[in-house]
């Protein structure tokens, strides 16, 4: 690959890799995702670094683990001083733009993006701050799984309205870049909120599936005496332990989730067509990913906030110039995207001040990837201690202060049914290796103290803003109507708006002088 290709980064929200056909799901319809994979690179073992929207996204954008940047929960302020991949790409000459969700809380709503086409779907203040100082404290609403049992087809919803706007604005921006005389390379992030719950979908996507053919979870609810402590906490957090869903309710929720994946897949196809029809596809690397997954009833769990594969593994697909069809099986994580984007743009590791990931571009280009351990953290509501995860080529290990460790051999036990943590000498040696690495990476007591101090600060600020005028941090997309449509110099404006671009005055009839 020569020059600086454009980068289109498409994000879904809460899309588990295991619920997509690219990763082996036999029912879900996602032809555009499959087509992207058929011509590109599939990272078979890609993980988020926190199974929660905000921390995962801030970690991904900064290339740092959540605890390293204070990205503890969905209401944490993302400091404007932390470099993101958007900052690095701007320094490398790219025009950067965001359309859609990124979960920025605080007054900086750009974080390196030169343009932002939509506001966020969620609040940018501190209203969702957890409280580890008070066991049992909620976020002002009770976490439950009402959305699971209310799943149904619909014509419109809040999420559909949002995602349709995200798509429209992004496609218009893609065409604008094709007409841009500067020919500056661009990095466009298009971030949708679906298939995040509620799992409502329009009839044309709902009707792709017959409900009696929807699969039930491959692993059911485990006996209480076999549950690890974190699973017990999450079951209680969502009140799942108080209700038993019927098979039809589970099928209906999965029906809605699969339909929402198909809806996002259609938008991926629309974005790719816009690149193709505007003549930019051959110069654009397309990256598709999600911030985390969804348990979808597996093991009796729903949503996220846990470290099982359905919640933690995400799709990660790359396609474009310089890439050919192959799979990468080594574990990778969303932390790797920042150095990958920097390398695609022509930069090197020397350009990056701090990072916890490694560039995937060499592996995407067909080179052998060095095996390493990837990490994830959970530091938000539903727990009162940090929870950590390490994953290498074979094993996954979970740690939390006061909890017995959990160890799975994912090669032999992909369903994560057998905890090997205390089952013999071989597992003891493996566990000791993981424990030593965890001790080197994390100081749980210090992280917990930092989480509580930050929560207390944010709750005080939040409560202060209930008195007097509340600050306006939500991003306000502003359109300058003076630069739209036909204004001064109408002929020139119309020529530049045409694609292919016409020179001003082309096609005019010249009148003979009398």
Image (cartoon, rainbow, N blue to C red):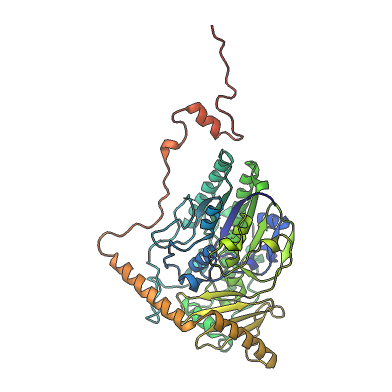
What residue is shown at x 66% (from left), y 71% (from top)?
Answer: 331
Residue at 62% x, 46% y is 275
Name the spot of residue 145 as percent of width and height, x first. 49, 71
- Position of 471 with respect to 443 (left or right) is left
32 shown above or below 176: below
* Viewer-nearest residue: 218 or 309: 309
- The residue nearer to you, when weighing 87 against 49, is 87
Splitting the image into 4 quarters, where does residue 104 fall?
A: bottom left
Please state if 119 lies on the left or on the right of 271 as rendered.
Answer: left
Residue pushed farthest front?
Answer: 350
- In this view, 330 is above or below 474: below
Q: Quadrant of the C terminus?
A: top right
Residue furthest left as drawn: 468
Single out the residue that lies furthest toward the top: 514
| Residue at 55% from the left image edge and 27% from the top image edge | 504
Image location of residue 413, percent across then percent down: 69, 80
In x, y percent, where is residue 175?
57, 42
* Front residue of 272 and 148: 272
Quarter residue 224 falls in: bottom right
Above or below, 457 against 198 in this view is below
Looking at the rendering, which quadrant does residue 510 occupy?
top right
Q: Is residue 245 visible?
A: no
Residue at 59% in and 47% down: 185
Can the viewer see residue 396 in this picture?
yes
Instruction: Count up the numbered dots.
Output: 0
Q: Position of residue 47 (x, y in %)?
A: 61, 70
């Amino acid at each position: 690959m020569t020059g600086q290709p454009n980068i289109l980064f498409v994000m879904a929200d809460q899309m588990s890799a295991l619920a997509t056909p690219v990763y082996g799901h036999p029912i879900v319809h996602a032809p555009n995702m499959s087509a992207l994979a058929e011509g590109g690179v599939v990272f078979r073992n890609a993980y988020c670094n926190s199974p929660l929207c905000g921390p995962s996204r801030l970690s991904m954008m900064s290339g740092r683990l959540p605890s390293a940047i204070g990205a503890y929960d969905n209401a944490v302020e993302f400091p404007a001083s932390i470099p993101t991949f958007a900052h690095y790409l701007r320094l490398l000459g790219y025009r950067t733009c965001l359309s859609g969700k990124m979960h920025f809380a605080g007054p900086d709503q750009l974080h390196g993006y030169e343009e932002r086409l939509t506001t966020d779907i969620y609040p940018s203040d501190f209203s969702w701050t957890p409280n580890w100082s008070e066991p049992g404290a909620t976020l002002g609403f009770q976490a439950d799984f009402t959305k699971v049992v209310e799943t149904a087809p619909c014509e419109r919803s809040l999420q559909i309205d949002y995602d349709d706007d995200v798509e429209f604005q992004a496609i218009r921006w893609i065409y604008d870049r094709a007409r841009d005389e500067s020919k500056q390379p661009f990095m466009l992030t298009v971030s949708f909120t679906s298939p995040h719950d509620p799992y409502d979908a329009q009839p044309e996507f709902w009707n792709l599936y017959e409900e009696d053919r929807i699969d039930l979870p491959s692993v059911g609810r485990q006996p209480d005496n076999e549950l690890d402590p974190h699973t017990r906490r999450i079951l209680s957090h969502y009140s799942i332990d108080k209700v038993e869903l019927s098979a039809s309710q589970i099928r209906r929720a999965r029906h809605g989730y699969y339909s929402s994946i198909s809806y996002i897949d259609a938008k991926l196809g629309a974005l790719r067509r816009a690149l193709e029809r505007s003549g930019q596809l051959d110069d654009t690397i397309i990256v598709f990913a999600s911030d985390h997954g969804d348990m979808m009833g597996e093991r009796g769990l729903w949503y996220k906030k846990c470290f099982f594969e359905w919640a933690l593994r995400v799709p990660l697909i790359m396609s474009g110039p310089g890439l050919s069809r192959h799979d990468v099986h080594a574990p990778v994580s969303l932390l790797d995207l920042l150095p990958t984007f920097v390398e695609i743009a022509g930069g090197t590791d020397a350009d990056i001040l701090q990072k916890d990931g490694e560039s995937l571009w060499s592996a995407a280009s067909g080179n052998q990837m060095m095996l390493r351990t990837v990490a994830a953290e959970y530091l938000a509501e539903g727990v009162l201690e940090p929870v950590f995860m390490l994953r290498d080529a074979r094993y996954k290990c979970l740690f939390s202060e006061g909890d017995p460790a959990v160890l799975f051999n994912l090669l032999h036990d992909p369903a994560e049914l057998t905890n090997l943590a205390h089952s013999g000498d071989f597992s003891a040696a493996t566990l000791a290796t993981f424990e030593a690495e965890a001790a080197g990476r994390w100081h749980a007591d210090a992280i917990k103290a930092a989480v509580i101090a930050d929560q207390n600060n944010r709750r005080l600020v939040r409560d202060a803003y209930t008195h007097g005028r509340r600050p306006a941090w939500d991003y306000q997309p502003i359109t300058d109507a003076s630069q739209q449509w036909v204004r001064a110099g109408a002929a020139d404006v119309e020529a530049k708006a045409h694609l292919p671009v016409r020179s001003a005055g082309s096609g005019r009839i010249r009148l003979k002088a009398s």
